[in-house]
Amino acid sequence: MAKDAVLIIQNITKRFGKKRILKDISFEVYEGEIIGLIGSSGSGKTTLLRTITGFFAPDEGNVLFRSDNFLKKINRNSTYVSIYGKHNVTKNLFGFASQTPSFYEKLTVRENLMYFGSLYNLSSKALRSNIEILLALFDLKHAEHTLGEKLSGGMERRLDIACALIHDPEILVLDEPTSDLDPLLREHIWSLVQKINKRGTTVMLASHHLNEVENFCSRIAIIKDGGLIELETPARLKAKYSSSQKIVIETYPGNYSNIVKSFKKPGAKAFDAQIKGSELVLFSDQTKMVLHELLHTLDTLGEELIDIRVSRPGLDELFLKITEKGEKNNKGGNMREQSG
C-alpha cells in the first residue's frame, strides 16, 4: 500500500442482474497523478468510475480513501477508510464530470457555478474566489452571463468541468471528456486537464483515445470486458508490447509501392509496411539494418528523401496487441497492480 495513494480500489466486482460488468478489479490511485482508464465502448469504464466515486455500490470489494481530517473527527488510527456510507465526505473528495453535460441550460455560466458551489460548505468569499479562478482558467469570463443553452460544444464541456471543480476537490473524475468534440477542441480540453493537474488535483479519466492520452497520463489502465488487464506507464507499455520501432518517411515523387516491392527482395530484413497518405510507415526490430537498406533503395529508385522519423509505435497502434496478450496473461487470476 503506497503512502501517497489517495484511493485504494480493492477487488471491485459489480453486477447488474445476472450480468457481471466489473470483475475483481484492484489498483491504487496516487496523489497528483493523471490516470487514464482506456477501453472500448461497453468495456466497463463508466461503471468503474461511478463505483469508485460511490454512485454505485459494488457487489464485492471496497474503495478506500485517505482523509486525515475525517479520521481525526472519528478518532480512527487507520489512514484509509471506505467511501461507502460517507456521502457528505466523499462528495467533497470528488469532482465528477460525465459524458453528458449536467449544468442547467436556463442558467448563465456564472449562475451555474454559483448554484453548484452552493451545494457545498463554502463560505461566500471562497465561492466568489473559486468562481473567478475557474472563469479565468477555463476562458469563460467573456461568457459569464451567457445562458447554458447558448454555449458551443467546447464551452459546454469546459463549463461542466468547471462546475465539477467549484469546491476544489482532491480528485477530478472525467468520463470521456472529449467525446463528440473536433480535434482542435479535444486538444484544448486535454490542455485544461493538464493545467488542472499542475495546480495539485489528482485526475482520473476514461477515454478510448489512446493516442491522445499517452503523452500526459502518468499511468494507463487497460479495461476489457470488465477486467483490468494492464496498468503501467505509457513508456513501459510500449517497451513491453513493442520490440519493433516505427520508421516514417516521406519522399518525392513518393512511389511507395515500388519502394516496398524493391525492399521485399530475397534476403532483405524483415519489416511490415503501411502507406498512410503522403508517408510510408515501416515497423521493424532491426531498425539500423532496415534504415541502411532503405536509404540505398531510395537512392537506387531516384526517390528524394524529404522527411524521416524513428520512434516506438504509439499505444493506439499497440492497443489490439495489448488487449489480446493482456487477456491471455490475465486468465487464471485477476491482474494485480504493477508498480508505476
Image (cartoon, rainbow, N blue to C red):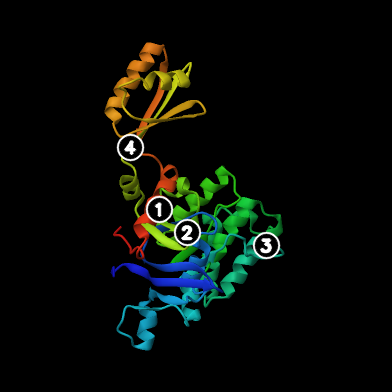
Please give the residue where the numbered disc 4 appears in the rendered image: 244
Residue 41 vs residue 152, the one in the foreground: 41
Please give the residue where the numbered disc 3 appears in the rendered image: 108
Q: Could you tell me the amino acid type at mark 3?
A: Thr
Q: Could you tell me the amino acid type at mark 2?
A: Leu
Do the residues bearing badges 3 and 1 touch, measured as CB atoms within 8 Å?
no
Which of the two discs, 4 and 3, labels the residue nearer the N terminus?
3
Compared to residue 207, the image places residue 49 above or below, namely below
Please give the residue where the numbered disc 2 appears in the rendered image: 205
**Location of residue 272 (image quadrant):** top left
Residue at the bottom extreme?
75
- Where residue 279 appears, as percent x and y from the top left, is 47, 27
- Where residue 318 appears, as percent x and y from the top left, is 41, 44
Which of the two discs, 1 and 4, labels the residue nearer the N terminus?
1
* Mark 4 surroundings: few (<14), some (14-19) or many (≥20) residues within 10 A: some
Q: How many marks?
A: 4
In this rendering, the label closer to the viewer, 4 or 3: 4
Left or right for 117, reference 245? right
Q: Secondary structure at mark 1?
A: loop
Residue 76 vs residue 14, the one in the foreground: 14
Image quadrant occupied by the C terminus: bottom left
Q: Calculate the distance from the C-alpha at mark 2 to the C-alpha at mark 1.
A: 9 Å
Do the residues bearing badges 4 and 3 touch, measured as CB atoms within 8 Å?
no
Q: Could you tell me the amino acid type at mark 4?
A: Ser
Which of the two discs, 2 and 3, labels the residue nearer the N terminus?
3
Do the residues bearing badges 2 and 1 touch, measured as CB atoms within 8 Å?
yes
Image quadrant occupied by the N terminus: bottom left
Please give the residue where the numbered disc 1 appears in the rendered image: 217
In this rendering, the label closer to the viewer, 1 or 4: 4
Q: Calculate the distance from the C-alpha at mark 1 to the C-alpha at mark 4.
A: 23 Å
